[in-house]
Each structure stands twice: as C-alpha cells, then as structure tokens.
Image (cartoon, rainbow, N blue to C red):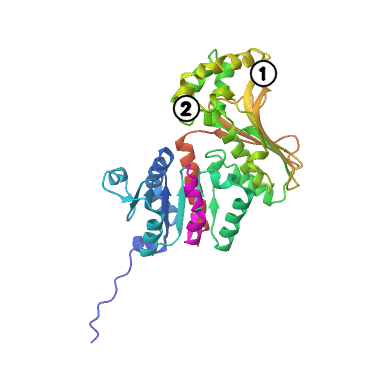
Amino acid sequence: MNTAIAEQPKTLIQLRALKQKRINIALFGRGNVGSVLIDQILSRRTEIQQRRDIDLHIFCVANSSKVYLGNGLNDSWRESFDQPLETYSLQRIIQYAREQNLQNLIAIDNTASSELVSFYPQLVKQGFHLISSNKIANTKGLTDYRALRRLLAEHKKEYLYETNVGAGLPLIDTIKLLHLSGENITRIRGVFSGSLSYIFNTFSEQDISFSEVVLRAMEKGFTEPDPREDLNGYDVARKLLILARELDLDNELDDVAVQNLIPKDLRNVCQSDFLALIKELDVPFQIKKKNLSKNSVLRYVADLKGDLMKEDGGLLSVRLETVPKNSVLGQLKGSDSLFEIYTDSYGANPIVIQGAGAGAAVTARGVFGDILRLSDKIN
C-alpha cells in the first residue's frame, strides 16, 4: 500500500505569493527624500502585493559611511540604524546581492554624489536597473552621457529619472512620448525651480524684502542649505539641459546662458558669511520690483527654443524675466513649477504641466512612481 501522504493543496495566499514578482531595491541616500520614500514604500507594500502581484523588498539602505543589508525593512526600520552597521562599500552591496541570489535588482540614487554616479556603469554590469533623483549623470559631458546609454542597452537595463526635472510631475515621460511619437516640439519654457518660484511669487506680490523672502524659503525647506545653489541659476540650467537632451540635442551645460542672481562679491564667500551679508541683495531687487509695471511680476524663467529638429539647434537660457500678471507664468502661486511645451500640433496653445515643484514628499512620490513603472517592465 502506498502510504505516502498526499501533498496538501496550496492556499490562495500561497499561490499568490508564488505568482508575485519580487523587486529587490538598494537605496542610496537616507536623507529627507530617502527616508520619506522608505515610509511610502512600506505604507503601500501590502496593497501593491495584492493589486499588482509585486513585492517591493528593500534589502539595502546606504549613506556615505554606513550600510544596512538584510531581509527587508518594516515600519520600525529607523531602529535598525540605531544598531551597529557595516561600513559602506559598493562592492559589499554587490557581493551581498550575489550571495543572496537576488534578482530584479534596482539601485535608487537619492544622493547628490558624483562619486556614486561614477559607479553607475559597475551597477549596470552587475545586473542593476537604475532610478535617480540625482541630476549629475544626465548633465555630464555628452561622451559620458551617451556611454551610459550604450551600456544600458547592451545589458538590457533601464534608467528612470522622472524627478530630475519637476519633482513628482509627469514631465520627462510626457516629453519622451511626444518626441518618440514624432511630434515636433518647438519650445519648452517655464519656471523649473520650486524654490525660485516661491521666492519670486512672494516677492512680487508682498511688501517684503528680498532677503527676508529667501530666509523664509530656507525655513520652509524649499531651498538648498546654501540658497546660492538655487539663486545662482545652475540647478535650473541643469534641468533645462536634461530636457534638451531628451530631444536628442547635442548641448552641454556651457551652452546654457545663465543669469546668476548672486553678486560677484558674494559668490565665493563661505555660507555663514553670505547669510550674514544677504541684505546686500535687497536694494538691487527692490529696484527691479519698483520698476515693474502695475500688471507685471518677476519670474525666473528657463527657455529652450530654436530649430529643435537639428541636433545642435537648441538655444538655452535661464534668466529673471518680467511677465504679465495675467499670463500662465504670472499667475503661479506658492512653490509650484510650471512647464509650457509648444509643438507643431498644438500650435500657439502649449501643453501646460503645473504642480508642486519642491519638497521631499513630492520628490519621493516621483521616485516611487519610477519604481512602479520599472517594476512593470522587469520580466
């Protein structure tokens, strides 16, 4: 007699677990955006498992000195970082993923590190897809920019970076789809910086000094710790360059005409000295405000135009402009960013994308969106 015990039928939960695609995430950067992103993933993980059969598994969280490696995080993940952690090493992270036979790997860069960007090729070669809120890889020289894309194609890996421009707004995907579909984009113009949007929206409308507005923006967390990183215009220039390259234009960062809002004598002093001298900005900006007509306001505007069908046809500029108060840009409020996309098909009426342009929560939500998009693509 066969006395073997028949295998028990699997439960629905067990069958669903077998069906689920596990996505193994290594997250670099545990600052504001990184921490908020972890909380967002954990709060939605069960729902995503149930609705999309995708299991988002964070096996690694690293900063510049320490790294957590383990079998996933839970809601009390911050306590894990109160314990002794391994010293950060990219090779150790790659080794751990190999030892654990982890598949469907995504490396998420929420840092501002150029060193980590230099390791993107190594991550790709070791089987990682890339998601980044870090703009550096997309604003390096064209040689490096194109080399990374060739490597991604060679290894059949994806690189998503929707939050490079517009935080959580669906901007880069929109431009990609328009361009790939053959739509002739003739101009992209707008307020690309949530911090500068807040500063000039407030300064133009309220009886307040320019320095006071900047300090208020700092308190709200809209600017970088050193607000000159916003006021010098180069963050906006990098965003404009990224969009130009999405249109296959052969532009470099030096091609962007940038109006730096910081006086020359304050550009190279230390941060504390700059903040101590920030009132020196008040008089020149008050003069600009006084010279405004009744129905005009100030906006810091990025503009890409020219013959954009030619690879070298883009004219890129970022500068302070006077715009009509009743225009789309003139009606901006708070820290919203706004992008006008002009095309042949839409004529004089641009596609307008507008929304929150600053803050850890919206940036993290944009990265989360990239994770979900990439998770659907991974086989």
Is residue 23 shown to the viewer in this render?
Answer: yes
Magenta residues, start to end: 112-129
The kind of residue tagged 1 is Ser
Asked whether, in this view, residue 184 is left or right of residue 275, the answer is right
Residue 250 located left or right of residue 171: right
- Between 379 and 84, the residue placed more toward the observer is 84
Q: Which mark is residue 270?
A: 2
User: The residue under label 2 is which amino acid type?
Assistant: Cys
Tag 1 near tag 2, CB within 8 Å: no
Overall secondary structure of the magenta stretch? helix
Residue at 38%, 61% in the rendered image: 95
At mark 2, the secondary structure is: loop
Residue 335 locus on image (x, y percent): 53, 28
Mark 1 against mark 2, which lies toward the viewer? 2
- 83 above or below 276? below
At x 46%, y 19%, the residue is 276
